[in-house]
Image (spheres, grey):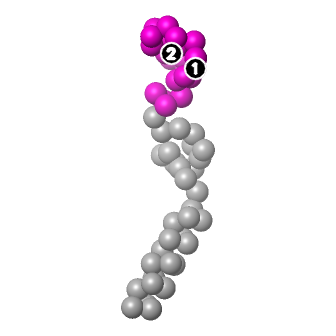
Amino acid sequence: MKAKIAVLTLILLVASLSPATAGNERRIGTSGAQELRIPVGARGTALGGAILADVQGI
């Protein structure tokens, strides 16, 4: 039982120390899903969701 706890603790420690990537090392800290970057605010809520995202960088 102690060995299982030690192994689990070691796995969690190693997993928490590795950098979070979205693809490869060049993209560390970037969002993997671009739709999560759509700004949400009071104006869009008041307009009933009429605010749309536009395409950039194409």
Q: Is residue 26 left or right of residue 1?
A: right
Tell me: residue 47, above or below residue 25. above
The answer to whether 48 is drawn above or below residue 39 in the figure is above
In the image shown, does 46 or 56 lie closer to the viewer?
46
Up/down of 22 relative to 47, above or below: below
Mark sitting on residue 45: 2
Residue 47 inside the magenta-drawn segment: yes
Question: Three-letter amino acid code at disc 1?
Answer: Gly
Q: Could you say whether the residue bearing mark 2 is in a helix, strand or loop?
A: helix
For the magenta stretch, what is the residue range?
A: 34-58
Task: Please give the name of the residue rendered at 57% of the width and 39% of the height, measured from the top-left corner.
Answer: 30
Task: Out of 18 and 4, give the one closest to the viewer.
Answer: 4
In front here: 55 or 36? 36
Is the stretch drawn in magenta largely helix, strand or loop? loop
Residue at (54, 17) in percent of width and height: 56
Q: Is residue 40 visible?
A: yes
- Give the numbered dot on residue 41: 1
For the N terminus, the quadrant is bottom left
Residue density around tag 2, few if under 14, some if 14–19, many if 20 or more, within 10 Å? few
Residue that sits furthest to the front in the current view:
46
Residue type (three-letter) at the residue carrying disc 2: Thr
Local crowd at mark 1 within 10 Å, few (<14), some, or many (≥20)? few
Q: Position of residue 43 (x, y in %)?
A: 57, 12
